[in-house]
Amino acid sequence: MTEKMRSLRNFFLFKCLLALTFWNHVSLSVENELFTSVSNNFPEGSDKKFNSLPLLYANNLQSKANFDWVVIQNTTESLSLSEITNKNVKELVALLSNFRQGSRLQNLTLTNVSVDWKALIQILQTVWHSSIQYLSINSVTQLSHVERCDFDYSGTSMKALIMEKVVITDLYFSQDDLYRIFADVNTAALTITDSKMIHMLCPSSDSPLRYLNFLKNDLTDLLYEKCDKLAQLETLILQKNKFESLPKVSFMTSHMKSLKYLDMSSNLLHHERADVQCQWAESLTELDLSSNQLTDAVFECLPVNIQTLDLQNNQINSVPRGMAELKALKELNLASNRLADLPGCGGFTSLEFLNVEMNSILTPSADFFQSCPRVRELQAGKNPFKCSCELRDFIHGERQSGGRLFGWPAAYMCEYPEDLRGMQLKDFHLSELACNTVLLLVTALLLTLVLVGVVAFLCIYLDVLWYVRMTWQWTQTKRRAWQNHPAEQETVLQFHAFVSYSERDALWVKDELIPNLEKGEGCVQLCQHERNFIPGKSIVENIINCIEKSYKSIFVLSPNFVQSEWCHYELYFAHHKLFSENSNSLILILLEPIPPYIIPARYHKLKALMAKRTYLEWPKERSKRALFWANLRAAININLPMADGRRCGEAD
């Protein structure tokens, strides 16, 4: 290399190091030789970039001009190193030794570290006595030869240590040698994640740790048994491990007098036995038990002073009513469980936020908002709601409470019945009558009373009971006649006509009707109750028999007729025969005009007959009576067989 090129390179390097006075972060990539790539948040619009500057050469430059690492020490707050191996640990330690306490460098990140245990301890020990406060080691592979090492924790500026993805290749080593180094750290925070760690020792003395994160390891219920050295610990994260017993977890925390937040999510926790007592740290206010195997019994093993509780994704069917009160609880997450209804607030008097999404709630309790007046937000969406009156009452109660449903209306849809599936609850409506049982009963009762009243009125007005009684008597008479004299049921007609009249009109019947029809030409045989009723039988039975044996039924109508009860019977049975035999057997004779107002209501059939059928009116003038008798005979017009085979009207 020519002297001119060497001078240009030195000048360029000098410019780069001067530029570090404006940068806050330096990233170093360490391979076979130690290289640096310098990066910083340049001012917006700047495109300055310096990559792959050989650090060894820079160190050589330092021996000639003692200014380069002094610049980094005084200007850089964060340093990232990658590709650390056993081959360049010495150079790395030498580099870190430059950052003594008082240097500006506070954050150090080591990535892709492939060293043995002794080299890792050497790096940690160097950092422990530097200005670095936050150390993060990510992806430690092929960590081997674990052995007992002495570590000096004194005089450190360290506040937090993070170890991620640590892989130990040794098959056999002392667990105490490995875990003692980390158990006794005197930082405020310690994180060891995704490292398949199966245990951690209790610190040898009172630990200053306030934050512990053992996410995604293989820790079990044996962790920190009877450990009273973590009195200052406030946050403990044990997510994604292999804890099983909730009571044992509670006893683990009982000695952590300052513990406020505990994350036990995504473990194998369960609690079934009610006789096993739990003892939590009294200071614990936030507890995450999501994604475990907990059932309803979990409510018998909870911290009494808990304020935020996450029980999402467990196997909880309901919140027991007899559980111990959690008076301080403000936030409760019961999403993704098996709840069939909203939990009451009897044991949660201070509850403000409740999440019950993705459960099995069909019809949430309508009185929830009345029983939980302090709840400011309810997340109940994504449940298989059954759109019914109970759900309508719940929605109505929510609206009256001021709209406290989170995710409304998009997350609230009908699942049942099928014809309403997919409908948002805000579009679901039912009438007050369909859902108010009292109103429905009152309405049904009123309608029933009105119907009964109408039926009763019609029965009275139309004399329905009388007709029912007459129908019953007619049926019974026919049945008895059939049982007693079955042969008579086949007999032929015996009379031309049965005459029905009032006793007050008997004189006209005897003096006018009978003589004119039974004598002279035509030989009409009439059935009259005085001479043809059979003694010993009831009047109703005699009436039915006479009507059945007569071809026609003649009714002598007058004001006296409508006042006679028996005339009404006779008219009814004759009318019944008219419809049952589909015959034209009624002959009406109007003896005297009948004013409509004197006809009783039950004579509606008489009114109908007089309105629809032609009747013969008895003429007052004698000159017209001959025509009357001729028309009457013509209406009767039938020949009846005589007993000796001759017909009425034939000569002897």
Image: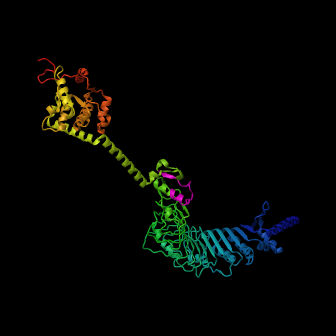
Front-most of residues 513 and 16: 513
- Observer able to see residue 95: yes
Q: Residue 551: where, in percent of width, then height?
A: 21, 27
Q: Which residue is drawn at 21% across and 40% down?
A: 473
Residue 207 part of the magenta-drawn span: no
In magenta, the rendered stretch is 395-416
Q: Give the side of residue 420 with respect to residue 617, left or right.
A: right
Q: Residue at x 51, y 51 (%)?
A: 428
- Observer able to see residue 33: no
In which quadrant of the rendered view does residue 99 lie?
A: bottom right
Where is 49 relative to 441, above or below? below
Residue 402 part of the magenta-drawn span: yes
Where is 493 relative to 398, above or below? above
Front-most of residues 607 and 285: 607
Q: Residue at x 68, y 81 (%)?
A: 155
Q: Residue 588: where, in percent of width, then height?
A: 26, 29
Task: Count up the numbered dots.
Answer: 0
Which residue ends up furthest to the front in the rendered image? 621
Where is 258 relative to 3, above or below? below
Q: Give the side of residue 392 with respect to residue 62, left or right.
A: left
Front-most of residues 570 and 316: 570
**Which quarter of the rendering shows the C terminus?**
top left
In which quadrant of the rendered view does residue 376 lie?
A: bottom right
Q: Residue at x 68, y 69 (%)?
A: 110
Q: Residue 496: where, in percent of width, then height?
A: 19, 26
**Which quarter of the rendering shows the N terminus?**
bottom right
Where is 405 relative to 132, above or below? above
